[in-house]
């Protein structure tokens, strides 16, 4: 995959996270603590995983900077989504985003077919988004 495709994926992912944050912000009174913790963990984990994979493929010789960036993005989004609910969800999102941000560049550096893995993880990501929205509607 070329660098332009990877950065367009990152921009689309950030747009999806912004839209999801606004959707959850309007409905946060209906969401329980367990669902809130799962949402913050999913947001922190998937953001760090996708960013870490795509950045290490785009910049394979900048492993340290990619790891720091992926972990910081996972911590930031996990914290933002967790603060919508309470401090337990905040802490769960931060920890999950951090750990996934550390592991994603390691995974990205050893894969042999990066395009297929990125498409697969995006499919799982959008399936989880669909499940989150269905769960919010049912709560």
Image: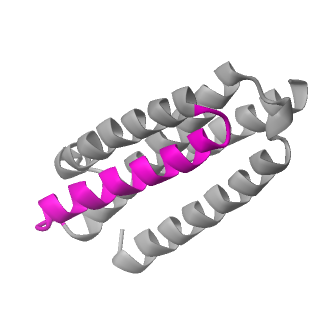
Quadrant containing the N terminus in the rendered view = bottom left
The way the protein has been coloured in the rendering is one colour
Q: Position of residue 90 (x, y in %)?
A: 52, 36
For the point 50% across and 45% down, the residue is 79
For the point 35% across and 60% down, the residue is 54
The dominant secondary structure in magenta is helix
Viewer-proximal residue among 44 and 110: 44
Q: Position of residue 74 (x, y in %)?
A: 41, 49
Residue 76 magenta-highlighted: yes
Viewer-proximal residue among 22 and 51: 22
State whether residue 50 appears in this view: no
Viewer-proximal residue among 82 and 116: 82
Q: How many marks?
A: 0
| Among the 4 quarters of the image, the one containing residue 56 | bottom left
Residue sitting farthest toward the front: 87
| Among the 4 quarters of the image, the one containing residue 103 | top left
Quadrant containing the C terminus in the rendered view = top right
Magenta part of the chain: 60-86
For the point 62% across and 34% down, the residue is 39
Q: Horizontally, is 112 left or right of 55 in the view?
A: left
Where 134 sits versus 112, above or below?
above
């Amino acid at each position: 995959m070329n660098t332009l495709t990877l950065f367009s994926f990152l921009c689309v992912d950030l747009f999806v996270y912004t839209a999801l944050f606004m959707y959850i912000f309007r409905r946060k009174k209906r969401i329980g603590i367990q669902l809130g913790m799962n949402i913050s963990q999913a947001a922190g984990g998937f953001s760090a995983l996708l960013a870490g994979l795509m950045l290490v493929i785009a910049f394979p010789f900048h492993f340290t900077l990619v790891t720091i960036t992926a972990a910081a993005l996972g911590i930031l989004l996990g914290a933002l989504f967790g603060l919508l609910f309470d401090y337990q969800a905040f802490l769960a999102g931060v920890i999950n985003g951090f750990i996934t941000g550390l592991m994603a560049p390691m995974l990205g550096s050893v894969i042999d077919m990066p395009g297929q893995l990125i498409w697969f993880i995006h499919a799982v990501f959008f399936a989880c988004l669909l499940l989150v929205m269905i769960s919010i509607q049912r709560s």
